[in-house]
Image (spheres, rainbow, N blue to C red):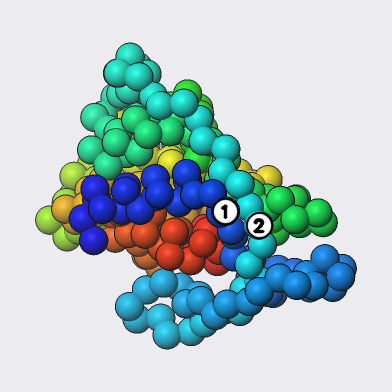
């Protein structure tokens, strides 16, 4: 799917008259069964990867989207200056639709919090804050590991960087290790509800990049490339809409 098709699909979902959210049944074990009475169920692919054939049972609940206003050109310029790198085109277009917001927030009484909490798409200012926090944590983790050039190459590959771009991302990580506070082409785009973990876009991972999790507990350094399963921002947006925002897509 082309990026613009994914953005149209996303926009159609956001302005839907009756949005719903799919909540993984495993996340609802402690919910009063009466809360789930009358809600329909659906089987969804759990990993949404071509090589993952497993499935998850989900409950469909009424939801709402609370998008932010569109980001202005000044907002985007200020963010680029703060990051020290240009925004990937897909992220720029998404922010131009919604400068952050809460999406797929369950509205069924008893599900509003916990597993029904919304996905938080970061605004320009929140991306800047998360980026600075992420770089501080990465700097601390790299200081502890004291990686050499080969280690940085392997780390870039775990971030999903393509082989021909891994040295570029490795050099950027090396600069962060050396004290740089800008210039790393890894972009926080969403925060998982109630946690410091981030969903990030790695621009140097193939033509359209990769989107995946970075976990605060690991200093935002991925332990395995499976933490970056989605091909580009369009792949992640398509997965969200097709799976109705199921938590297994984002958490």
Q: Which mark is residue 18?
A: 1
Mark 2 or mark 1: name the one nearer the start of the chain: 1
Q: In this figure, what is the number of numbered marks?
A: 2
Residue 243: mark in rendering: none
Q: Is 21 or 246 nearer to us in this picture?
A: 21
| x and y percentages locating residue 89 in the rendered image | 23, 38
**Percent x, y for residue 93?**
29, 36
Q: Secondary structure at mark 1?
A: loop
User: Circle 2 sits on which residue?
Assistant: 62
| Quarter of the figure with the N terminus | bottom left
Image: 77 above or below 159: above
Residue drawn at (33%, 78%) of the image: 50
Between 126 and 64, which is closer to the camera in this rendering?
A: 64
Q: Are marks 2 and 1 in contact (CB under 8 Å)?
A: yes
Disc 2 vs disc 1: which is toward the camera?
Answer: 1
**Which residue is located at x 57 percent, y 77 percent?**
42
Q: Residue 44 appears at what percent x and percent y?
A: 51, 76
249 is higher (above) or lower (below) than 87: below
Quadrant in the rendering for residue 169: top left
């Amino acid at each position: 799917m082309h990026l613009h098709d994914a953005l149209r699909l996303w926009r159609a979902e956001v302005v839907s008259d009756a949005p719903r959210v799919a909540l993984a049944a495993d996340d609802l074990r402690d919910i009063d069964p009466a809360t789930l009475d009358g809600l329909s169920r659906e089987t969804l692919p759990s990993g949404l990867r071509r090589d993952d054939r497993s499935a998850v049972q989900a409950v469909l609940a009424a939801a709402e989207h609370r998008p932010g206003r569109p980001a202005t050109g000044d907002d985007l310029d200020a963010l680029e200056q703060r990051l020290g790198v240009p925004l990937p085109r897909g992220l720029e277009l998404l922010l131009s639709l919604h400068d952050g917001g809460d999406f797929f927030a369950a509205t069924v009484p008893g599900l509003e919090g916990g597993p029904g909490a919304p996905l938080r798409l970061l605004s320009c200012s929140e991306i800047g804050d998360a980026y600075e926090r992420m770089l501080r944590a990465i700097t601390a983790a790299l200081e502890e590991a004291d990686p050499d050039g080969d280690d940085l190459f392997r780390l870039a590959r775990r971030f999903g960087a393509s082989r021909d771009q891994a040295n570029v991302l490795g050099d950027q990580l090396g600069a962060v290790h050396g004290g740089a506070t800008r210039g790393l082409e890894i972009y926080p785009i969403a925060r998982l509800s109630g946690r410091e973990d981030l969903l990030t876009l790695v621009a140097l991972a193939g033509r359209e990049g990769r989107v995946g999790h970075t976990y605060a507990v690991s200093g935002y350094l991925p332990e395995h490339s499976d933490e970056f399963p989605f091909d580009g921002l369009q792949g992640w947006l398509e997965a969200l809409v097709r799976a109705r925002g199921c938590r297994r897509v984002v958490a």
